[in-house]
Image: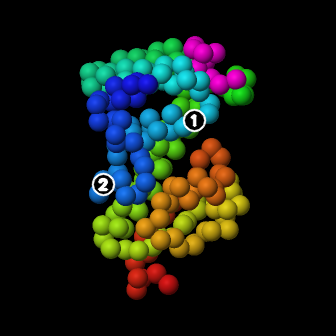
Amino acid sequence: MGFFKTLLGRSAGNRAPATPSAIATEPPSFDAYLEAAVRASADFTAEGKELIAEHLRRRKERERADLPPKANRAAHRAEDDALDAEAARILSPGVKAGSRVTTLMGVLFVEAATTRSRDKTIQSCRDLGLTHVTLMIPQTGEECAWCVANDGAKFPVKDDINALLRKNCTCTPSPKCFFNAVVEGFDA
Ligand SMILES: [Zn+2]
């Protein structure tokens, strides 16, 4: 179980995203959010999660090695192919036949980035003494009924917005909405 701790250094384990009170001025790293998304995903087996953790660790090492762009892309592709080749071990039985591990990973990358971005907005509001954010949808027509119904609604930043989304939002594969700070006097 120490896998995710070793994945990105010793601090990763105790820096996973948690409740708002645990969020420092800057939210935890993107990697911490990605680890949390992988860990929470129902798409991967327990063994699969360990293989993915290894894959991400190798990828980080390669990034640190700072290869020339062409070599970097080739190494990247080889790593992705190796991961997809292990799909039978990595993917949960419920996952649609023919799914690629790297495609599902891509979804988690987006989810991790957007979740972190929301936490960052909320944290900035708290730091600035702002009390509310407004939910906005990109209006692509792909948002869930809850997001559409709450487009423009205000939410207090003292709450855990990501927990609110986990409870209510059914956008697939992850929430499509974003939040803007409400600055009194500027917003109606
Ligand atoms: Zn939604």
x%, y% of residue 35? 44, 35
Quickly name the residue at label 2.
24
Position of residue 91 in the picture relative to residue 16 (left or right): right
Residue at x-position 47% and y-position 43%: 112
Mark 2, residues whose alpha carbon is within 10 Å: few (<14), some, or many (≥20)? few
Residue at x-position 44% and y-position 68%: 157
- SS assignment at label 1: loop
Identify the residue at the far left of this view.
Answer: 65
> As displayed, is residue 33 above or below residue 140?
above
In the image, residue 155 lies in the stretch drawn in magenta: no
**The disc labelled 1 sits on which kind of residue?**
Ser
Question: What range of the chain is rendered magenta?
Answer: 85-93
Query: What is the number of the mark on residue 151?
Result: none
x%, y% of residue 33? 43, 42
**The disc labelled 2 sits on which kind of residue?**
Ala
Within the image, what quadrant is residue 120 found in? Answer: bottom left
Quarter occupied by the N terminus:
top left
Query: What is the number of the mark on residue 41?
Result: 1
